[in-house]
Image: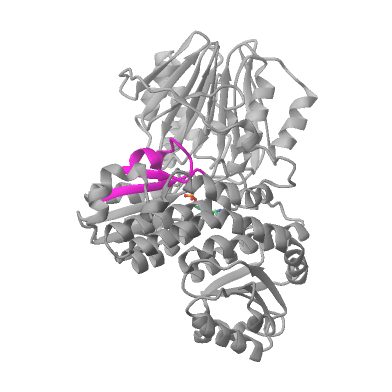
Amino acid sequence: MCGLVGYIGERDVTPILLDGLKRLEYRGYDSAGIATLVNSHVEIVKRAGKVNDLENLVALNPKPATIGLGHTRWATHGEPSDKNAHPHIDHTGTITLAHNGIIENYAAIRQRLQRDGVEFTTDTDTESLLQLISAFYDITGNLEDAVRFALSEIDGTYGIIVMSSKEPEKLIAARMGSPLALGINDGEYIVASDASAIVGHTRQVIFLEDGNIATLTREGYEIKTIYDEKIEHKVTEITFDIEQIEKGGYDHFMLKEIHEQPQTVLDSMRGRILKNHGTAKLGGLRDVMNALNSAQRILITACGTSWHAGLVGEYMLEQYARIPVEVEYASEFRYRSPIIRHDDVVIAISQSGETADTLAALREAKLQGASVIGICNVVGSTIARETHAGVYTHAGPEIGVASTKAFTSQLAVLSLLTLMLGRNRGFISLEQGVEIAKEFEAIPGKIQQILDENISEIKTIADSITESTNVLYLGRGYNFPTALEGALKLKEISYIHAEGYPAAEMKHGPIALIDENMPVIFIAPQDKIHEKVISNIEEVRARKGRVIAIVNHDDEQIESLCEHVIKIPPTTDFLTPMLTIIPLQLLSYYVAVNRNCDVDQPRNLAKSVTVE
Ligand code: M6R
């Protein structure tokens, strides 16, 4: 949450900061600001609203500078307002700072400094850290030392960028629990909360570790621990292109990302299917293969959409690899004293690889001796680095706050894992494995077919539910998690209340909601519980509910029972969610567009939730 960017070099810093903030805006977007050093004087421009609003304000009085920092905010402490927008400046008007994370002991620091006469001007937790740095600066006269001393008193999480008008040749960045990457270019450095703000300038980056403090000057950089010990870091090459983080002709990132799925699912599976052996190979899991093959239990932990992928994973791993699986909300996992055994394997699923709850859960699992695997999309992310082994989903940068292509890629990886473990553990035969592998290869084409054939019908359905206040999503088996995910997509971006349920659970309560105004979306491919789902559809019809269904092409029986149907090609049962979710993503997209909602930056949300 929140985007941070800082620059030191020879070029005009303002356009670099604004461009960086636009690329980071998906991380948080309730206010934004930049601070630059102009003739050794701190100039801050900030305001509530989007980066575009900030840009307009900056344009009124442009001031060239070659060092600065910027921030786009997702409010935690203090409402989104001009005053609370970052960067902040200390009471002496010397030091400016932007912060991502939460300072947990901010109140105690604030009281202490206020007793010493320091005047606070914002409602943020961040200002306590800033004024504390300022207090140490008073004593040391050295920004790096002041930052180090102040951070050693902080409880909580931070990614920070700091500069001082008294040391105009220096930018300091530090992290603890909140990502920061340092881009290295000829005579210039760009530090940002993720690589999307860096890739337009350089591909060479260093991912800072927790407890690192980086000091950047035009002459070079130095990374130290909080205890002042110098450390070396590997420079990594960013592999994605700038085009991948642009809209490419689509109205929204979400629509682009939905349409990318034939390719991203292919990329998730590329080189990982051993067709003739009817199995899969996930090289990243090499070090934990023994633990996986002999696991007595798998625990999957994740949040939001990634948690839904985990639920599908539970169904497939239990059915095909015969391993008991439990799926846990990461936010609950750590705090409910979970029983974790040494022969458990814990899988943490995360698109961003930075979700604080998921990170906390995996750390707990590691502490208790389990082998921990990550399924992450962002290369070099904290979760990817802290797990014992892992698999990247290779979906490419996902910018839309509502997760789409990351979900199908997570499903692809979980399906490969299922095939591999099912074969290794002897529950999938060679013949079955070969059949499944063939079906894997057909999935990208089938996703493309759904995108090609259904847009017009989906738009019609979207028109018919745009004014609804509630929508129910029902599915069974593998498509119960799809129902949850479809409902999450609709509520996130259109603000229509939506719930997902196992279709048969409806009669135990939610059926009371059904009347002629309630759209009920059934996910009903022809699987082994198809007949049962038809009975559930009849139950809704009997109460005059409006039935919309996702069905296979030749399913005339259901078609005759529904107001609308969306037709998709058939596939093997455990792969169906990769197909059934596509129309649901599109449906929520078109409903949100009809309602004039901000699709890519829905209210109150942020792309990566780096606070617990
Ligand atoms: O980056 P992660 O996969 O760890 O994020 C988990 C959730 O925050 C995320 O899936 C969230 O629910 C999305 N907004 C869903 O569209």
The picture quadrant where one finds residue 337 is bottom left
Residue 421 sits inside the magenta stretch: no
The picture quadrant where one finds residue 27 is top right
171, above or below 440, in the image: above
Instruction: Return the x and y of residue 455 as percentages of the image width and height.
Output: 73, 61
Using residue 8 as the reference point, say whether residue 421 is left or right of it: left
Instruction: Return the x and y of residue 601 as percentages of the image width and height.
Output: 65, 48
Instruction: Return the x and y of residue 550 as percentages of the image width and height.
Output: 63, 72
Instruction: Judge by depth and name the residue closer to the eye, 434 or 99.
Output: 434
Residue found at the very far bottom of the displayed protein: 542
Point 56% across, 85% down: residue: 536
Q: Is residue 75 visible?
A: yes
Using residue 2 as the reference point, say whether residue 250 is left or right of it: right
571, above or below 526, in the image: above
Count the marks: 0
Residue found at the very far left of the displayed protein: 342
In magenta, the rendered stretch is 371-394
Q: Is residue 88 visible?
A: no
Instruction: Return the x and y of residue 347 as percentages of the image width and height.
Output: 35, 53
